């Protein structure tokens, strides 16, 4: 039996509404769907309420309506009856989805045939969270402290706040194993991160902070993340020219992605166990890049209700976990369970 979308009651309500303009508060919509609207409806409204956003818009477009107005202050949305325009948008959405399916077939995307069910994936993540809850000073909490501080102070931070961001980032990276052995960061103090921190909170990359999952399959957004990654590599190279060869040290994908996860929350950390989890699940390519990121975003959206329910559950009373943090926890734990004889990279 085909599963009925939780948004179907909204579609039915809009179909049965005889008024040209149907005004609904966010609370009324949430009562209809029996759940809270995703955070993007409030914080990334231009994306969520966009009639071209097929993942959500189809629910009002199928009712022959388009969004005439929305207001995140008053928390209302106004749906206008315009069957011709709605059908036009819906046709474009279906065409884009058709092109995406063809593209997936051509590239034989791994996440079309996952070897592990979504329930198993989320179950693995619960094991990760249990470790955090058992110890109020668990090292995994370093992510919450670092990410939470960056989110709170990311807009035009003072010099003092930038200094504290460097400290948070340094300790988070240390607790996540990035100062072990021959790691070049071991030879530097925490202020080596200052140019990187300034880049992360710059206006150019402000949209990547807690980026909605639907945007993380967008080519422009993925290209922006890859550009940011390259810039971080070059900054560290320039900051480490004194270490050995005079050409500077190259930051690994593991370091880059742990930084992006701990500060922006838009990328999972591609360390040894995370990549092992991807290998076991066959959800996405193991190597860090736009293609793997896009596949992970698609996987999250394919199981959106399950992931979002879990994400909201563990975020209660804590820093708000991001979709890519959920992805990171899930597949890291799967990889760790496969080989739990050591610590993560």
Image (tube, helix red, strand yellow):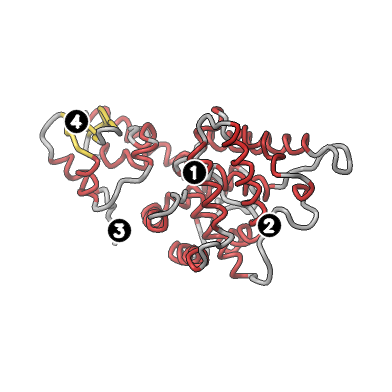
Q: Residue at x 64, y 71 (%)?
A: 340
**Circle 4 crowding by C-alpha within 10 Å: few under 14, some 14–19, many from 20:** many
Work out how far the residue at label 4 is from the one at label 3, CA to CA, in angstroms: 28 Å
Quadrant in the picture for the C terminus: bottom right
Picture coordinates of residue 301 (x, y %)? 43, 49
Among the two numbered marks 1 and 3 on one chain, the one whose residue lies closer to the N terminus: 3
**Circle 1 crowding by C-alpha within 10 Å: few under 14, some 14–19, many from 20:** few
Q: Which mark is residue 2?
A: 3
Work out how far the residue at label 1 is from the one at label 2, CA to CA, in angstroms: 41 Å
Quarter-wise, where is residue 246 in the image? Answer: top right
Instruction: Classify 92 as above or below 136.
Output: above
Work out how far the residue at label 2 is from the one at label 4, CA to CA, in angstroms: 55 Å
Q: Nearer the viewer, mark 1 or mark 2?
A: 2
Among the two numbered marks 1 and 2 on one chain, the one whose residue lies closer to the N terminus: 1
Q: Nearer the viewer, mark 2 or mark 4?
A: 2
Q: Is residue 18 left or right of residue 78?
A: left
Picture coordinates of residue 21 (x, y %)? 16, 30
Q: Which mark is residue 273?
A: none
Q: Which mark is residue 102?
A: 1
Badge 4 is on which residue?
81
Picture coordinates of residue 251 (x, y %)? 73, 44
Instruction: Classify 145 as above or below 264.
Output: below
Query: SS class of the residue under badge 1?
Result: helix
Work out how far the residue at label 2 is from the one at label 3, CA to CA, in angstroms: 45 Å
Instruction: Classify 331 as above or below 265.
Output: below
Q: Nearer the viewer, mark 1 or mark 4?
A: 4
Q: Nearer the viewer, mark 4 or mark 3?
A: 4
Query: SS class of the residue under badge 4?
Result: strand
Badge 2 is on which residue?
177
Q: Residue at x 35, y 32 (%)?
A: 50
């Amino acid at each position: 039996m085909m599963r009925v979308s939780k948004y179907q009651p909204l579609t039915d309500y809009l179909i049965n509404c005889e008024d040209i303009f149907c005004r609904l508060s966010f609370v009324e919509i949430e009562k209809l769907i029996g759940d809270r609207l995703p955070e993007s409806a409030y914080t990334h409204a231009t994306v969520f309420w966009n009639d071209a956003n097929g993942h959500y818009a189809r629910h009002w477009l199928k009712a022959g309506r388009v969004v005439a107005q929305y207001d995140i202050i008053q928390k209302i949305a106004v749906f206008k009856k315009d069957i011709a325009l709605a059908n036009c948008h819906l046709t474009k959405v279906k065409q884009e989805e058709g092109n995406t399916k063809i593209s997936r077939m051509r590239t034989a995307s791994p996440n079309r045939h996952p070897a592990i069910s979504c329930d198993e994936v989320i179950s693995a993540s619960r094991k990760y969270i249990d470790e955090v809850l058992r110890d109020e000073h668990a090292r995994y909490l370093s992510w919450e402290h670092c990410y939470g501080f960056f989110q709170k102070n990311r807009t035009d931070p003072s010099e003092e706040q930038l200094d504290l961001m460097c400290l948070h980032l340094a300790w988070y990276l240390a607790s996540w194993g990035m100062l072990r052995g021959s790691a070049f960061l071991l030879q530097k103090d925490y202020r080596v991160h200052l140019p990187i921190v300034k880049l992360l909170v710059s206006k150019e990359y402000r949209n990547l902070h807690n980026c909605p999952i639907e945007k993380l399959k967008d080519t422009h957004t993925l290209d922006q993340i890859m550009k940011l990654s390259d810039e971080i590599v070059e900054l560290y190279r320039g900051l480490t020219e004194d270490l050995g060869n005079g050409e500077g040290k190259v930051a690994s994908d593991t370091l880059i992605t742990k930084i992006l996860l701990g500060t922006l929350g838009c990328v999972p950390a591609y360390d040894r166990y995370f990549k092992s989890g991807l290998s076991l699940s066959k959800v996405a390519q193991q190597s860090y890049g736009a293609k793997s990121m896009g596949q992970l975003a698609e996987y999250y959206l394919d199981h959106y209700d399950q992931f979002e329910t879990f994400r909201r559950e563990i975020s209660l009373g804590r820093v708000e976990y991001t979709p890519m943090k959920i992805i990171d926890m899930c597949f890291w734990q799967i990889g760790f369970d496969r080989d739990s004889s050591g610590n993560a990279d």
